[in-house]
Amino acid sequence: MVASSSGSTGAQRREWRRNNRRVTLVKTFAVSLVTALVGVCAVGSADADAPGKGRVDVLELEVQNDQYTNTDLGPTGPSLGDMYVYSGTAIKDGRAAGRGGGSCQVIHADGEELTTQCLITIELERGSLTMQSLWVSGTNALDMAITGGTGDFSNARGTARYWDIATSKERVRAEILR
């Protein structure tokens, strides 16, 4: 009887340990899940409560180019590596609103059709915006990714569209997400 008594006690202890491990695992999983959910909710609510988060600013400017140079690298004439550098004034409601400039470097040449990698920075009173894109020479419009900025535009992203490039009617519309 003693043997059977201790045998059932051993079996009961093993069963208790197995159940205790399951309970511990379930509790650990539940605590981890709650912690993760609380963390996600806290991050989401912090972003939602932050001023200006998720806001779209639309900026429409005229562009008056004032300096331009072309650096001809490699063979004479349009070729891979050639660079165009330019600067100008951003105009809003007839008044200077900032300055900017950039460069485009030829990354593919197919006869007279040139594909360039372009980088532009505009410095405004509220901060700067940086943009980049590929552009095929001769096309009228250019869509650029807004890749960042400073000041009020810190961590900016979005899209900027330029029209009538290198003409007296050049303009840009930037949709800035922040």
Image (cartoon, rainbow, N blue to C red):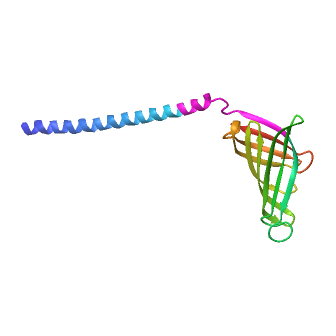
User: In percent of the image, x 76 and y 39: which residue is there?
Assistant: 175
User: In percent of the image, x 16 and y 39: which residue is there?
Assistant: 10
Q: Is residue 49 magenta?
A: yes
In the current view of this chain or complex, which residue is farthest to the bottom?
75
Figure quadrant of the C terminus = top right
Figure quadrant of the N terminus = top left
Tell me which corner region of the image, top left, top right, bottom left or bottom right, holds residue 6. top left
User: In percent of the image, x 85 and y 66: which residue is there?
Assistant: 78
In the current view of this chain or complex, which residue is farthest to the left?
1
Q: Is residue 7 magenta?
A: no
In the current view of this chain or complex, which residue is farthest to the right?
168
Tell me which corner region of the image, top left, top right, bottom left or bottom right, holds residue 59. top right
Q: Which residues are magenta?
A: 42-61
Up-down relation of residue 117 to residue 177 (above or below) = below
Up-down relation of residue 158 to residue 140 (above or below) = above
Which sits in the foreground, 16 or 63? 63
Which sits in the foreground, 84 or 20? 84
Where's residue 82, x and y in %? Answer: 80, 63
Where's residue 44, x and y in %? Answer: 57, 32
Where's residue 137, x and y in %? Answer: 85, 57
Where's residue 122, x and y in %? Answer: 77, 44
User: In percent of the image, x 45 and y 32: which residue is there?
Assistant: 34
How many discs appear? 0
Q: Can residue 42 be seen?
A: yes
Which sits in the foreground, 28 or 96? 96
**Is 137 on the left or on the right of 128, as rendered?**
right
Which sits in the foreground, 8 or 121? 121
Up-down relation of residue 67 to residue 173 (above or below) = below
Q: Can residue 139 be seen?
A: no
